Image (tube, rainbow, N blue to C red):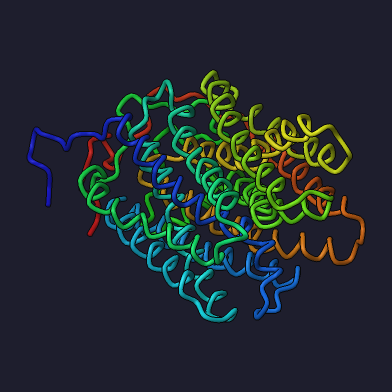
Amino acid sequence: MNPTPGKPPTRPRPGPAVALGLVILCIEGYDLFILGAVGPSLLSHPDWDVTKSTLGLLGSLTALGMPLGSVAAGWAGDLYGRRLPMTVSLAWLSLSMLLSAVAGDLALFGATRFLTGMGIGALIPLVTAYVSEAADPARHSLQVGTATTGLAVGGIVTGVVGRVLLPEWDFRTLFLFGAVPLVLIPVVWRLVPAVVRDHPAQTLPEAGTETAEAEPDESPNRLRRLLAPRYRRSTLLFWAATFAGLVIVYGASTWLPTLMVDNGYDLGSSLEFSIAFNAGAVIGTLGAALVADRGLLKAATVVSFLLAAVAMIVLSTPQPRPLLLLVSAVAGFGALGTQALVNIYVAHAHPARLRGTALGFSLGVGRVGAIVGPSYLAAVTVLISSPKAGFYAFVVPAILGAVLIGLLRPGRRASAPAPADGPSGTETPLAR
């Protein structure tokens, strides 16, 4: 339905949008990190005959569903608004986690992880775009970054729950908590607007593209617009940087506890490292977002990639326990925090009418890294007997990501705000 003439729809307020995004991504972070938390329990399952290679395959199955969810949800979010796709994705994610909890064999469990991956892939671009459009332009990176720390907070919750309940409880019980998103559906329907619109005062400093001016290409094919000359270079660099970042994120989420066990720590200790990893992602992302809002988004993202490489090298060496926990926190920022910054960068670089598609394709194509990450780590740990090999395997994608972000060209600050959904900058209903 068209908005009443002279009374444009009320723009979502930043506070509620950030809070809702934080909660949704917290639940998503739980669903993401749960496989890593139960990894040691899976390896010791008496009936399923799980090996390290199998664990890597399960992580890759989860990641395999993510590109489908990311691309479809990003496109649907630009075409139909954020509300309906977000509601469907929450329901899908909850039902998939419930199926994981009741899976009676390894094949069915693997299938449910694929379905869960589709839900996870859908929600990140939708939530990032929604919060980006509600954010105060002067605090855009901080507010979007605050919402995206929900992934790390969910990882902390996963570590705490795993620490308390494992190995005494059946690991499948932990998947029951994944049904919580069902209670958020009415909240999403009430708070998330049905139209896509930019903030009327939003500018896009240091976006890496020149998107702050009116687009000459108004093709309805959004992928074609992303690959047009204006966007092509930054689009391809964002895709490749997301690939590198997600190799780190999903490799770490699947393998970090197991790598710590292989280095001589018990299950409880490895879960403490996982908690430190995610706490570092929260604190580091917020700090980096404050820096990014001062016009240093590119520098903050490059440094965060490099911190991931340094932290993983240090984690592979014998260190006093307090230092290892601290470096685990730095590694968390270098993994989850880095990908949050890349997502913020993509949101900065595109107007509202293209933002969901840009995020969806960036995450969708980059999800190949999420698919490759767990199996890549599994292959390294199988082929190289040293317990340090898994940590060193993270260094290559971390350095690659820093180089790719460094290749982005500085964007020009807009002389006028980016247009919203109409050619005159007025808000118009989305195409049906």
Residue 142 location, x and y as percent?
47, 27
Residue 199 in view here: yes
**Along the horizontal axis of the image, is 152 left or right of 313?**
left
Task: Compare residues 169 and 114 and report the one nearer the observer.
Answer: 169
Q: Residue at x 33, y 54 (%)?
A: 86
Q: Is residue 81 visible?
A: no
- Give whichever of 385, 251 is nearer the camera: 385
Q: Position of residue 329 (x, y in %)?
A: 67, 34
Looking at the image, which residue is at 39% across and 47% down? 24
Q: Is residue 70 left or right of residue 194?
A: right
Residue drawn at x 31%, y 58% is 182
Instruction: State the quadrant of the C terminus.
Output: bottom left
Seen in the picture, residue 266 relative to 62 is either above or below; the reply is above
- Residue 334: give x, y in percent of width and height: 68, 37
The answer to which of 6 and 302 lies nearer the viewer is 302
**x and y percent of residue 333 in the render?**
64, 35
The image quarter in which residue 139 lies = top left
